[in-house]
Image: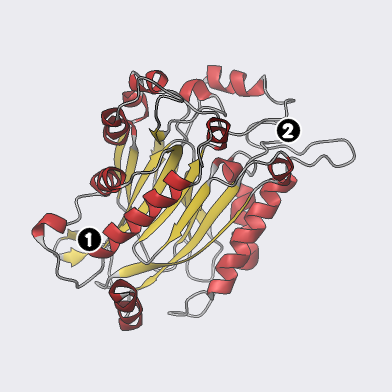
């Protein structure tokens, strides 16, 4: 990636652009399972460890996410009888999207189990490690998204294969003694995160300030890097140590400054293969109008954005007057399950603390 100010732009090599161009007139199918041997030797190609700081955070108060999610199986996949293998997470300190590999149904495995169990376990860990002003035992301290995902994977039992995208809000960072909340973004595969901010004042339009990049083997839209647990029905050479190696060596991690009012869009490849970034930004600006200071967006608006993004993503693979629409991967895009999380960064309040304390007790 190339860092320009606070926006991260990704450039694909020319051979990748040619490869994508050759697929432009094809109707693309969903993700394929990538076997262990295909991933093991190339993990370091995908590894990223980057920090993106902006100006000093002034208010010296903790922040959290206000988020809503929406997911829908593509109608074409419903007709083929495939199960929705996507999973989403919306909690105050952690957001997530996992895109499970539906192909595993051919091996009598439920492809939705691992994505859902992983995110559920990540949420439980985040509630212990990341809640502001909460005493934490030293052994339970937050050590970054890689450690969190490793611990969640080791605690899980389900079979499956999935891409993973996590965004953790860490209120523990201090710069020159002042609180500076950061978002740690971890990605394995081709889910993506887009951060928007009103850079020219609270009444200005939202603009993209950060965007992650996809991790795909040989730039193939059907073979992203994956986190898996499978048995001999699929891969006789599988060992869980390889999955942990994918997390440690293959994940892309970015740490980004967080500010009140920032908007985060986390989506599966069904979103970012079908919609251009400016189309997503346009949807957000159309629905999320500027508000008065300290006034948070109603959750219903976040839901409206999420539903619109999924609807517009699916529309790209429907021909109009015999013509398919343009997408980032060519005309007609990709027929796929589509899931999205839309979040606003807001101040962490006593009301949040009380609600989530009750959740923990239950």
- Residue at the disc numbered 1: 129
Q: Position of residue 138 (x, y in %)?
A: 9, 58
**Is 15 rendered above or below residue 130?**
above
Q: Relative to residue 268, is residue 183 drawn left or right?
A: left
**Is 305 rendered above or below residue 275?**
below
Q: Relative to residue 155, is residue 234 drawn left or right?
A: right
Q: Quick one: SS at disc 1? A: helix
Q: CA distance from mark 2 to mark 1?
A: 44 Å
At 26% from the left and 35% from the top, the residue drawn is 248
Q: Quadrant of residue 317?
A: top right
Q: Quadrant of the N terminus?
A: top left
Q: Relative to residue 143, is residue 115 drawn left or right?
A: right
Residue 7 seen in the figure: no
Q: Quadrant of the C terminus?
A: bottom left
Q: Quadrant of residue 183?
A: bottom left
Closer to the chain start, of discs 2 and 1, is 1
At 58% from the left and 23% from the top, the residue drawn is 17
Q: Quick one: SS at disc 2? A: loop
At 79% from the left and 36% from the top, the residue drawn is 324
**Viewer-side label of 2, 1:** 1
Residue 63 seen in the figure: yes
Q: Position of residue 27 (x, y in %)?
A: 72, 30
**Category of crowding for the residue at label 1, using alpha-carbon neighbours closer than 10 angstroms: few (below 14), some (14–19), many (at least 20):** many
**Is 47 rendered above or below residue 172?**
above
Q: Residue furthest left?
A: 138
- Residue at the disc numbered 2: 331
């Amino acid at each position: 990636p190339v860092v320009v100010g606070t926006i991260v732009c990704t450039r694909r090599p020319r051979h990748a652009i040619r490869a994508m161009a050759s697929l432009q007139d094809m109707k693309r199918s969903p993700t394929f399972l990538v076997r262990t041997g295909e991933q093991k030797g190339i993990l370091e190609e995908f590894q990223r460890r980057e920090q993106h700081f902006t100006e000093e955070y002034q208010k010296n108060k903790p922040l959290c996410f206000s988020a809503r999610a929406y997911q829908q199986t593509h109608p074409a996949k419903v007709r083929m009888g495939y199960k929705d293998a996507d999973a989403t997470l919306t909690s105050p300190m952690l957001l997530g999207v996992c895109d499970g590999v539906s192909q595993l149904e051919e091996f009598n495995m439920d492809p939705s189990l691992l994505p859902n169990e992983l995110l559920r376990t990540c949420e439980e860990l985040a509630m212990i490690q990341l809640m502001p002003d909460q005493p934490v035992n030293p052994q339970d301290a937050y050590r970054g998204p890689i450690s969190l995902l490793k611990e969640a994977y080791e605690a899980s039992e389900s079979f499956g294969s999935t891409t993973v995208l996590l965004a953790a809000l860490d209120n523990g960072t201090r710069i020159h003694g002042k609180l500076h909340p950061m978002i740690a973004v971890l990605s394995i595969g081709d889910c993506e995160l887009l951060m928007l901010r009103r850079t020219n004042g609270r009444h200005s339009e939202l603009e993209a300030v950060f965007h992650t990049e996809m991790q795909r083997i040989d730039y193939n839209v059907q073979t992203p890097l994956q986190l898996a647990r499978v048995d001999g029905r699929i891969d006789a050479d599988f060992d869980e140590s390889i999955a942990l190696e994918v997390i440690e060596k293959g994940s892309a991690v970015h740490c980004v400054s967080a500010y009140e009012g920032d908007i985060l869009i986390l989506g599966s490849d069904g979103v970012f293969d079908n919609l251009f970034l400016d189309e997503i930004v346009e949807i957000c600006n159309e629905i999320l109008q500027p508000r008065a200071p300290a006034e948070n967006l109603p959750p219903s608006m976040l839901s409206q954005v999420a539903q619109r993004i999924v609807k517009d993503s699916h529309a790209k693979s429907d021909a109009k007057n015999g013509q398919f629409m343009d997408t980032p991967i060519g005309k007609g895009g990709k027929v796929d399950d589509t899931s999205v999380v839309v979040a606003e960064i807001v101040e962490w309040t006593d009301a949040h603390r009380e609600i989530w304390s009750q959740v923990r007790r239950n």
